Amino acid sequence: MSGAIVGRFFVRFVVCVLFIFIFGVQILLGKRLIRHERTKSLWTQKHEKALNLIAKLLILAISADMIFFCIIPSISDLPHIMGKEYMMVKGPALSQALTNDVRTKSVRIQDAVTGEVVHVQFCYNQYVYQGDILEVWYLPHTRLGTLKSIMRPPADAKPAKPDC
């Protein structure tokens, strides 16, 4: 597993925890997130209590999303990182990633052995076309991975249409 994926995994985890901690402490201490003293708007002064309630509920919803889709999967993957026990999928790409810059590619791959469809994310600086044979090592809960090999179809094969 590349250091970039583990680094991104760690940064993602820390950002989620800091967001929840900073805003959680402010909400638990009863601090106002929106203060009418900072604005000269009469509307803001009149609706300050409702605006603070909406802001706190929005932060609560974002925090719950981060807990269930970032923190819990990240904690579940820690034993796999420590033991270097990564999952491997090898098979054709069922979706395309058509950005040519170095960004995280998000691709669905059908495992050639089990037939299971796995959605993984990895770094790669070229296009990934539908039908490319990919070998990706990934973490089972966050689905962050490293592309180990890619085999392109023959040059005369036309790329498939995007599945948008």
Image: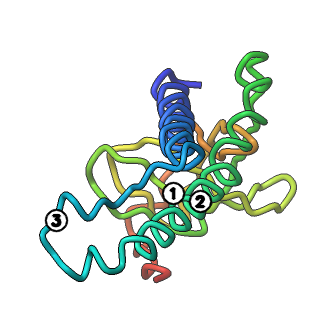
For the N terminus, the quadrant is top right
Can you identify the residue that label 1 sits on? 106
The x, y position of residue 93, in whole percent, is: 59, 62
User: Residue 162: horizontal and vertical position, in percent?
Assistant: 43, 79
* Comparing labels 2 and 1, the label whose residue is closer to the camera: 2
Nearest to the eye among marks 1 and 3: give it: 3
Residue drawn 27% across the image and 74% down it? 45
Return the residue nearer the eye: 150 or 139: 139
Which of the two discs, 1 and 3, labels the residue nearer the N terminus?
A: 3
CA–CA distance in space, label 2 to label 1: 28 Å
- Checking the image for residue 46, the label placed there is none
Q: Which residue lies furthest to the right in this view?
A: 114
User: Left of 84 or right of it: where is 158?
Assistant: left
* Rendered residue at 66%/53% (across/down): 69
Question: Which numbered tag is attached to residue 60?
Answer: 2
x, y percentage for residue 154? 46, 61
Q: How crowded is mark 1: few (under 14 residues within 10 Å), some or many (20 or more)?
A: some
Q: Does residue 148 show up?
A: no
Query: In this view of the protein, which residue sits in the foreground, 94 or 13?
Result: 13
- The residue that appears at 19% across and 80% down in the rendered structure is 42
Q: Check disc 3 and report the residue beneath it.
A: 39
Q: Is mark 1 on a helix, strand or loop?
A: strand
The amino acid sitting under disc 1 is Ser
